[in-house]
């Protein structure tokens, strides 16, 4: 603020200097007198002018004497100004003094009382304002953070309980629908998924243990019997049991391999091997491969394949998936029935469907049959490791497609849609 | 046949060597890649069995080095990595066949013998295949047995052709899947058996001596049964 006052004073001095240049001391003195008169007539004004001789005798201006503390010839000073008769009210003034050629002295300044007053009032307002805002902020912050802390603590408590084993718990939601509720909602969804996955794992582990324990037990039995016979007499008998044991072991290995394969496909590890697959040729190959089996089982396999359908994928996996589906159809369809395989293009998808007139799959089981080792009650005794459809689903998903099971009235219709993609 | 086994697992190597010996072959073992590479280049072997994961030198790198040194010995790669991508890598590196672990010995044996057969006969110059009184004309695609024509569908023809090219050798189901149908997959039901029995119906059923035999625990073999 002081700088501003000084700048204003300097401006005024420039004006006086211009006058001095034109009209000399006389001219300048006239201007000063005019300024003083105007200020007096306006009854306001803060300007202070004083022109004196070298000996400090006042010549023109509105200051009655040269300030006592202005000893230097030139520079900026501050001094007390008495504005009333009694000398009670004192204002502060800021001025610039200098010596003119011809040994005159000039003082130009301003009454800064109002300025300082204003300054004081602003500072006061700011202080009060700040204090008030601080209190408000503090109170507000306290309130908000208390709410937040409470919500976070609730979240923490719930997650602590979940971590200690109670997976069924969920984070409570308020009606506020704020960020915290969003977090809570997402956490709950994550927990739902984790619970599902854990149930899956538990079930799969149980099933694996169950489904593989029997063959392993059988394996052991065969080996024991082989040992028995090897000890004693006929090597031929021992050979037979060993054959059987090896077959059992092979079947187990095949199940494990299938499990591994499904796991790898689901983890997306095999997507790197994608190339262009001629699905039309593939579908014809699968149909032709299984046609022999159909003939033997007195079924008919009819294939309608639209030519020229190709997509990015892994040839062997798609073949395996389609083979599994057709294999199932042949397995469950009755003698004398027809199994229809078709491949056609529908908009941007390659649609493969396999329809049989077997027992079909009841609606309530249609989600379940894709799970590992799931066997429908009626097919528990038939051959197979229960992984066929799991692998099909894994392959379909790897290729970004969808698989649906529908009623064939009667029978089952499996529909696989694989995107043909323009992205390559 | 002289076969070199390059495998760091002593138990597996011994197992293979023993099996090969029982089949009438002689096998040497190299437990390290650098030893194996050296031995493969020096002593002339009929076939190599190379494990993919070797200390000091990767199996694929070993084969690539051999091929670069103009060693054409057929090589079968054994690997715990069975995925198609790995298989392709192995064949591109210069391997001739790829067998994932765990494997049935009969499979290994059948494939090794098929490899050596492949390298000795040059397939391009043959126009006819003959096994006993079964004749196949590769140019006209005609098949006859004891002078009587046999009508085969295209796939049956390919199946018979493969069996004839590997006559007197064990041909496993997997080999048939890979070579006749050109897919690597695991059929749930043994559909191959059905195809074989259909083929039998055409070439063996109305004739005196059966040519297409089942080798228990291994696969099939087309062979003239000499009394």
Image: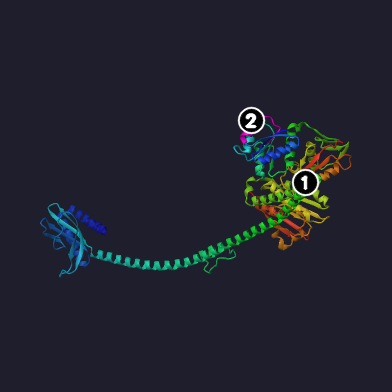
| Dominant secondary structure (helix, strand or loop) of the stretch shown in magenta | helix
Provide the residue span drawn in magenta: B33-48
Q: Which of A239 and A309 is in front in this view?
A: A239
What residue would you read off at disc 2?
A: B69
Q: Which of B39 and A196 is in front in this view?
A: B39
Q: Are marks 2 and 1 in contact (CB under 8 Å)?
A: no
- Do pointers 2 and 1 mark residues of a single chain? no
Q: In which quarter of the image is residue A112?
A: bottom left
**What's the mark number on residue B123?**
none
Residue drawn at x 60%, y 65% is A168
What residue would you read off at disc 1?
A: A231
- The location of residue A356, given as percent across then percent down, is 78, 56
One can see residue A171 in this view = yes
Q: Nearer the viewer, residue A90 or B140?
A: B140
- Would you place residue A280 above or below residue B128 in this image? below
Q: As drawn, is A38 to the left or to the right of A175?
A: left
Give the color scheme: rainbow, by chain, secondary structure or one colour: rainbow
């Amino acid at each position: 603020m002081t700088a501003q006052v000084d700048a204003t004073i300097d401006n005024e001095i420039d004006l006086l200097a211009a006058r001095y240049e034109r009209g000399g001391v006389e001219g300048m003195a006239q201007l000063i007198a005019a300024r003083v008169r105007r200020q007096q007539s306006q009854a306001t004004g803060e300007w202070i002018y004083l022109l004196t001789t070298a000996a400090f005798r006042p010549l023109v201006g509105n200051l009655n004497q040269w300030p006592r503390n202005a000893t230097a010839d030139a520079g900026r000073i501050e001094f007390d100004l008495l504005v009333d008769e009694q000398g009670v009210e004192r204002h502060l003034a800021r001025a610039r003094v200098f010596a003119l050629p011809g040994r005159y002295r000039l003082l130009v300044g301003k009454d800064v009382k109002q300025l300082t007053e204003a300054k004081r009032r602003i500072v006061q307002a700011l202080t009060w304002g700040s204090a008030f805002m601080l209190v408000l902020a503090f109170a507000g912050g306290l309130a908000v953070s208390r709410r937040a802390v409470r919500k976070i603590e609730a979240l923490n408590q719930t997650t602590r309980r979940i971590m200690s084993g109670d997976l069924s718990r969920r984070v409570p939601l308020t009606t506020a629908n704020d960020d915290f509720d969003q977090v809570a909602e997402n956490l709950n969804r994550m927990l739902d998924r984790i619970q599902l996955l854990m149930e899956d794992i538990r079930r799969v582990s149980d099933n694996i243990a169950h489904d593989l324990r029997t063959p392993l037990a059988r394996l052991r039995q065969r080996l024991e019997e082989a040992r028995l016979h090897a000890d004693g007499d006929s090597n031929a008998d021992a050979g037979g049991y060993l054959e059987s044991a090896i077959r059992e072991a092979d079947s187990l290995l095949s199940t494990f391999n299938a499990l591994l394969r499904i796991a790898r496909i689901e983890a997306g590890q095999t997507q790197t091997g994608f190339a262009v697959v001629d699905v039309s040729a593939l579908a014809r190959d699968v149909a032709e491969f299984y046609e022999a089996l159909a003939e033997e089982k007195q079924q008919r396999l009819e294939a309608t394949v639209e030519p020229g359908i190709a997509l990015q994928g892994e040839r062997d996996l798609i073949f395996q998936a389609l083979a599994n589906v057709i294999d199932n159809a042949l397995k469950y369809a009755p003698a004398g029935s027809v199994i229809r395989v078709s491949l056609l293009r529908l908009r941007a998808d390659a649609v493969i469907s396999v329809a049989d007139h077997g027992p079909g799959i009841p609606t309530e089981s249609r989600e379940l049959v894709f799970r590992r080792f799931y066997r429908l009650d009626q097919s528990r005794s038939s051959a197979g490791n229960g992984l066929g459809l799991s692998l099909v689903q894994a392959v379909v998903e790897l290729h970004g497609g969808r698989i649906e099971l529908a009623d064939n009235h009667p029978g089952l219709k499996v529909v696989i849609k694989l995107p043909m993609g323009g992205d390559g | 046949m002289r076969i070199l086994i390059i495998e760091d697992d002593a138990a597996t190597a011994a197992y293979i060597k023993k099996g090969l010996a029982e089949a009438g072959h002689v096998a040497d073992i190299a437990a390290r890649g650098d030893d194996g590479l050296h031995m493969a280049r020096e002593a002339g072997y009929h076939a190599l069995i190379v494990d993919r994961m070797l200390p000091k030198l990767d199996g694929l790198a070993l084969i690539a080095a051999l091929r670069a040194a103009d060693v054409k010995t057929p090589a079968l790669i054994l690997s715990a990595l069975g995925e198609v991508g790995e298989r392709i890598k192995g064949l591109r590196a210069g391997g001739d066949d790829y067998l994932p672990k765990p494997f049935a010995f009969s499979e290994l044996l059948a494939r090794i013998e098929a490899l050596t057969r492949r390298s000795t006969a040059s397939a391009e110059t043959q126009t006819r295949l003959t096994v006993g009184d079964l004749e196949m004309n590769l140019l006209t695609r005609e098949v006859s047995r004891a002078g009587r024509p046999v009508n085969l569908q295209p796939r049956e023809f390919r199946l018979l052709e493969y069996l004839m090219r590997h006559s007197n050798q064990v041909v496993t189901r997997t080999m048939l899947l890979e070579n006749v149908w050109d897919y690597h997959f695991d059929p749930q039901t043994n559909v191959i058996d059905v195809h074989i029995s259909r083929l039998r119906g055409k070439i063996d059923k109305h004739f005196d001596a059966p040519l297409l035999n089942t080798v228990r625990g291994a696969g099939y073999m087309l062979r003239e049964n000499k009394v």
